[in-house]
Amino acid sequence: MNEEDKNKIKAYSKKTPLYLSRRKFNPQGVLVEVQCISCKEFKSIDDYSKNKIEIDGIEIKCKRCKSSK
Ligand SMILES: [Zn+2]
């Protein structure tokens, strides 16, 4: 899969209701909060570690859930 296809998939994934329901954006459309897949709490993106593989470039679990395992 080339880079262009990957970007298309990412762009498409960011428009799905499931994706949007787990995120909060500010009026400028900037991502500010993400719902942790583990504890289901909305947390600032600062509470997530970076992960290039994930769609937003951050982990799907917050730092606390990530470390309490
Ligand atoms: Zn969590």
Image: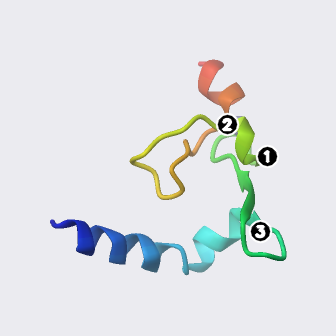
45 vs 23, nearest the viewer: 45
| Horizontal arrangement in the rendering, residue 1 relative to residue 31 (left or right) | left
Mark 1 crowd level (few <14, some 14–19, many ≥20, 10 Å Cα): some
Task: Kindly give the residue lying farthest to the left in the view shown.
Answer: 1
Question: Where is residue 2 shown, x and y percent of the image?
Answer: 17, 67
Q: Which residue is mark 3?
A: 25
| Horizontal arrangement in the rendering, residue 1 relative to residue 44 (left or right) | left
The reply to whether residue 62 is in sight is yes
Q: Are marks 3 and 2 in contact (CB under 8 Å)?
A: no
Q: Which residue is mark 1?
A: 43
Q: Would you say the beta carbon of the disc 1 residue lies within 8 angstroms of ligand 1?
A: yes
How far is mark 3 from mark 2, CA to CA?
Answer: 17 Å
* Kind of residue at disc 1: Lys
Q: Which residue is mark 2?
A: 62
Label 1's element? Answer: strand
Q: Are marks 1 and 2 in contact (CB under 8 Å)?
A: yes
Quarter of image, res 56: bottom right
Quarter of image, res 5: bottom left
How far is mark 1 from mark 2, CA to CA?
Answer: 8 Å
- Seen in the picture, residue 65 relative to 12 is either above or below; the reply is above
